[in-house]
Image (cartoon, rainbow, N blue to C red):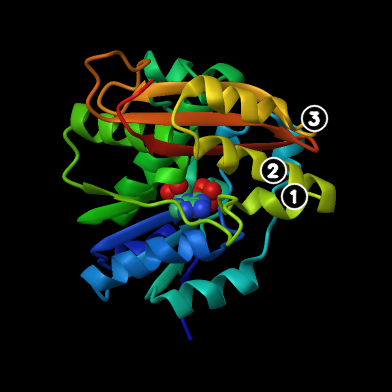
Amino acid sequence: MIEVIKSVDDLARQKYDLFVPTMGALHAGHQSLIKLAKEKSDQVLVSIFVNPLQFENKDDLAKYPKTLEADLKLAELAGAAAVFAPSYEDIYPGEITKIEAGAIGDLYEGKSRGDHFSGVLTVVKRLFDLTRPAAAIFGEKDFQQLFLIKQMVKQLNLPIEIIAAPIIREVDGLAMSSRNVRLDEAGRKSALIISKALNKDSISDMHEVLATEPGFTLDYLEVIDEETFLPATVNTKNKRAIIAGWVNGVRLLDNKRMGSSL
Ligand code: AMP
């Protein structure tokens, strides 16, 4: 059976090479991160903590799926050595010193979700302090999050390698997400429009595709420069289209590397 670490004191006695932070409700996307970690070391630690600080929408927080027993099984099957499932007090003992996410943290996801990235960086820094891994793996699914975590690690000079893992999709193209279980059948179909749009080569074609699906409400569609996370220009080498929106009131996001045209 996989080891479940429930207290900070127990964690302090252990050393793990690879760390995969999650909010639980694990799926094949999370498992791919754990498998990638396991290829590099047997000492893989997964954390499961639904971080209230990064939820601007209290309803979204209340509805966030919680499936600990199934998560332990999925983490074990993917190769994790242990799961750290801390309490709120473990993560936030006393007053919280927040990490600021800076200018990029206010764009896109940050614009729609207030203090979201400050909440993300604050919990990730705290988890890094507690788990002290050599490397941590994050999914490209949350591309802006990945960018901001890399930026934080650089700015604070943390001795942790950040490894990016590709987006895992359902067979029909929908990016896997813990929130997908909240879509009804019609919503599940509407959500497919996001990955369909991302298969186009230009931003105008993407807008055209998205506009054909009345069940999808667009928040933003942008082509960004992967190095700066600012809108891509003619000089941008690596471009990525990023999309976020809502289906059935469920927030969905996705992204894809783009070719050279805008
Ligand atoms: P979450 O539990 O949603 O906070 O996600 C935990 C980690 O899993 C983050 O690094 C996510 O980017 C990553 N992740 C979530 N969904 C996917 C996916 N479909 N493919 C790859 N990574 C993912």
Q: Position of residue 145 (x, y in %)?
A: 42, 35
Q: Position of residue 131 (x, y in %)?
A: 32, 56
Q: Secondary structure at mark 2?
A: helix
Q: Is residue 203 above or below residue 129?
A: above
The reply to whether the C-beta atoms of the residues labelled 2 and 1 are less than 8 Å apart is yes
Residue lying at 45% horizontally and 68% vertically, measured from the top left: 83
Whichever of labels 3 and 1 marks the residue nearer the N terminus, that label is 1
Residue lying at 57% horizontally and 21% vertically, measured from the top left: 220
Residue lying at 55% horizontally and 28% vertically, measured from the top left: 206
Q: Secondary structure at mark 3?
A: loop
Q: Is residue 44 left or right of residue 84?
A: left
Q: Which residue is mark 2?
A: 191
Q: Is residue 140 visible?
A: yes
Q: Which residue is mark 3?
A: 214
Q: Viewer-proximal residue, 11 or 237?
A: 237
Residue 39 has which mark? Answer: none
Query: Gap in Å between the C-alphas at discs 3 and 2?
Result: 11 Å
Q: Position of residue 98 (x, y in %)?
A: 43, 26
Query: Gap in Å between the C-alphas at discs 2 and 1?
Result: 5 Å
Q: Is residue 131 above or below residue 207?
A: below
The amino acid pointed to by label 1 is Arg
Whichever of labels 3 and 2 marks the residue nearer the N terminus, that label is 2
Q: Position of residue 102 (x, y in %)?
A: 36, 16
The amino acid pointed to by label 3 is Pro
Q: Residues within 10 Å of mark 3 (few under 14, many from 20)?
A: few
